[in-house]
C-alpha cells in the first residue's frame, strides 16, 4: 500500500491547502493512502504559532472531502503535539466483481442444504466453497451429497483445526475478486450477503464487517455475558485500530482478494495467534489502513447443533490477542 505523508510543517505554512489536495488527488491511485499530520490545537496558546495555519481535524477532513477523498481513520491524542488523519480516494463509480463465499463447517449437517437454498445470487460470478473440519455428525457426507446435486459447489476437508485454518484454506482456493466468509450455523442470514458485496462494489469500504449489536438479538442467540464481552472487545479494539468497529466477533466479513493477499503477505507481523480468523483480518486490515465499514445484521438462534465457542477459555484467548495487538499497534 503506497503512502504519501504531508507533514504538520507543510500544512502549517501552505498558502492554499485545498489547492494542495486538489493537485494531490490527480497524482494518487485508489490504493494510495494520504497521511496528513497537523499540530494539536490544544498547544496553540503555548507555542505561539499565530502566524501559521492552525488546523483542526475537522478542518482537514472537510478539505479532503471537498477534493474527493474519504477519511479512513483519525488518530486522536490530547497531550501529543500532533494529530494524524489517514485518507484515500472516494470512489466515483460502482464496480461489479466476482465473489467467493467461504463457509467453514464443523458439525453443521442440518444447516447445509438450507443454507445453499437460501443463498442469493449476486456478483458477476459466484462460487461457494465449503471447508469441513473434523465433524462428528456426518457433515462431510452431507457435503458430498449436496455437491452431487450442485456441481458448482466446491468442498475441501480441513487438515488443521480451527475456523481460521478453515477460512484460510477456503480463501487459498478462491477465485473471486471479493472474498466473503459466512458461518454455517445460519445465525446470520445468507440473504444479507448482497449488502456486504454492494459495500465493496460501491467503494463504501474496503473491509466490511457484520454487526450483530444494532438490532435486537434473538432470544438464546447470544448470552448476556457474551454481549458484555463483545462490547468490551469492540470498544477496546476501536481505540487500538483508530477506527470504529462495533462487533469484532461477527463471523460474516468481506474483503477484496487483492487486499486479503496483502494481509497474508504481512501476517508475520502479528503471527499465527488467532484460531478464529476475525482478529487476523481486523488487525491485518487496520495495519494496511483499509477503510472499515459495518453492515448491521440480525442475529438468530441456532436451529441445529451447538456452538463451537467456549465463553471463558476463548474469552481469555481474546484478551491475550487484544493485549498483543495493543503492544504492536500502539506502542511499537
Image (cartoon, rainbow, N blue to C red):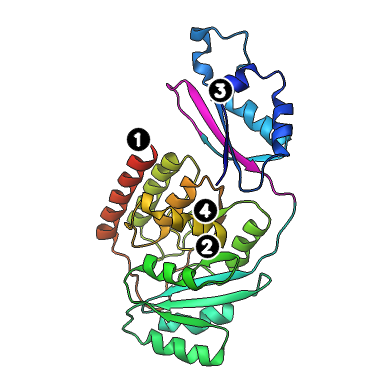
Q: Give the left or right position of residue 291, taking residue 95 as reference.
A: left
- In which image quadrant can residue 169 be found? bottom left
- Report x, y in % for residue 95: 71, 60
- Report x, y in % for residue 319: 29, 49
What residue lies at 69% left-to-right and 30% top-to-bottom? 63
The local secondary structure at tag 1 comes to loop
The local secondary structure at tag 2 comes to loop
Q: Tell which tag, 4 or 1, sits nearer the viewer.
A: 1
Residue with the mark numbered 1: 331
Residue with the mark numbered 4: 214
What residue lies at 51% left-to-right and 27% top-to-bottom? 83
Whole-number angstrom distance, CA of label 3 to CA of label 4? 38 Å
What residue lies at 59% left-to-right and 64% top-to-bottom? 178
The local secondary structure at tag 3 comes to helix
* Mark sitting on residue 258: none
Q: Residues within 10 Å of mark 3 (few under 14, many from 20)?
A: many
Residue with the mark numbered 3: 8
- Report x, y in % for residue 84: 52, 30
The local secondary structure at tag 4 comes to loop
Whole-number angstrom distance, CA of label 2 to CA of label 4? 8 Å
Whole-number angstrom distance, CA of label 3 to CA of label 2? 44 Å
Q: Tell which tag, 3 or 4, sits nearer the viewer.
A: 3
Whole-number angstrom distance, CA of label 3 to CA of label 1? 22 Å
Q: Is residue 55 visible?
A: no
User: Which numbered disc, 3 or 4, marks the residue that appears first in the sequence?
Assistant: 3
Amino acid at each position: 500500500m503506497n503512502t504519501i505523508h504531508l507533514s504538520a510543517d507543510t500544512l502549517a505554512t501552505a498558502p492554499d491547502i485545498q489547492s494542495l489536495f486538489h493537485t494531490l488527488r490527480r497524482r494518487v491511485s485508489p490504493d494510495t493512502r494520504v497521511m496528513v499530520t497537523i499540530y494539536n490545537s490544544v498547544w496553540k496558546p503555548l507555542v505561539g504559532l499565530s502566524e501559521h495555519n492552525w488546523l483542526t481535524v475537522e478542518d482537514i477532513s472537510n478539505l479532503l472531502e471537498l477534493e474527493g477523498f474519504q477519511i479512513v481513520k483519525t488518530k486522536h491524542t490530547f497531550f501529543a503535539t500532533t494529530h494524524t488523519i489517514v485518507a484515500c480516494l472516494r470512489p466515483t463509480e460502482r464496480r461489479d466483481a466476482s465473489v467467493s463465499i467461504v463457509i467453514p463447517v464443523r458439525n453443521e449437517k442440518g444447516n447445509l442444504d438450507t443454507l445453499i437454498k437460501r443463498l442469493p445470487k449476486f456478483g458477476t460470478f459466484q462460487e461457494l466453497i465449503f471447508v469441513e473440519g473434523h465433524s462428528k455428525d456426518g457433515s462431510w457426507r452431507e457435503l458430498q451429497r449436496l455437491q452431487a446435486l450442485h456441481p458448482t459447489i466446491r468442498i475441501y476437508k480441513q487438515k488443521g483445526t480451527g475456523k481460521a485454518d478453515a477460512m484460510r484454506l477456503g480463501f487459498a482456493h478462491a477465485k473471486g475478486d471479493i472474498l466473503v466468509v459466512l458461518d454455517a450455523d445460519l445465525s446470520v442470514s445468507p440473504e444479507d450477503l448482497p449488502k456486504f458485496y454492494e459495500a465493496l462494489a460501491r467503494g463504501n469500504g474496503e473491509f466490511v464487517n457484520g454487526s450483530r449489536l444494532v438490532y435486537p438479538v434473538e432470544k438464546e442467540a447470544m448470552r448476556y455475558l457474551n454481549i458484555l464481552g463483545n462490547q468490551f472487545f469492540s470498544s477496546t479494539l476501536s481505540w487500538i485500530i483508530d477506527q470504529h468497529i462495533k462487533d469484532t466477533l461477527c463471523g460474516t466479513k468481506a474483503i477484496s482478494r487483492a487486499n486479503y493477499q496483502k494481509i497474508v503477505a504481512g501476517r508475520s507481523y502479528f503471527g499465527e495467534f488467532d484460531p478464529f480468523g476475525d482478529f487476523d483480518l481486523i488487525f491485518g486490515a487496520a495495519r494496511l489502513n483499509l477503510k472499515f465499514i459495518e453492515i448491521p445484521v440480525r442475529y438468530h438462534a441456532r436451529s441445529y447443533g451447538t456452538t463451537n465457542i467456549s465463553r471463558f477459555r476463548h474469552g481469555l484467548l481474546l484478551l491475550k490477542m487484544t493485549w498483543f495487538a495493543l503492544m504492536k499497534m500502539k506502542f511499537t
